Amino acid sequence: MKSAYKYELAAAAGVSPRTLQRWLSANRAHLSALGAKPRQQLLPPKAVAWICQQYGIDL
């Protein structure tokens, strides 16, 4: 898995970036442990892999 922008993940999931942000806000503590900060747009590979697994996103 490689780094990805939040808008890329939103497009792959078929939702708006705002909706993706709402999904991620529920898991803020877990994402912080993976190295993703709340306002960060480019997410690290570990966070991208976890998000894709949790929400069924294929990149």
Image (spheres, rainbow, N blue to C red):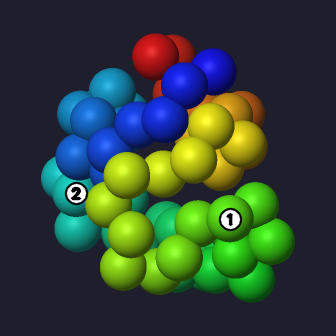
Mark 1 vs mark 2, CA separation in Å: 20 Å
Direction from residue 45 to residue 40 in the image, left or right = left
Measured as percent of width and height from the top left, residue 31 is found at 68, 68
Q: Name the kind of residue labelled 1 in the image.
A: Gly
Q: Please, what is the three-letter code of the amino acid marked with disc 2?
A: Pro
What is the x, y in percent for residue 15?
26, 45
Q: Which mark is residue 17?
A: 2
> Helix, strand or loop at disc 2?
helix
Q: Quadrant of residue 18?
A: bottom left
- Is residue 28 positioned above or below 19 on the image? below
Residue at the spot 40% in from the left edge and 37% down from the top edge: 4
Looking at the image, which residue is at 48% across and 51% down?
43
Who is closer to the viewer here, 35 or 31?
A: 35
Left or right: 17, with 49 as reference point: left
How many numbered tags mark residues here?
2
Residue depicted at x 19% and y 53%: 16
Among the two numbered marks 1 and 2 on one chain, the one whose residue lies closer to the N terminus? 2
Q: Nearer the viewer, residue 43 or 13?
A: 43
Q: Which residue is mark 1?
A: 35
> Residue 19 lies in what quarter of the image?
bottom left
Rendered view: 44 above or below 23: above
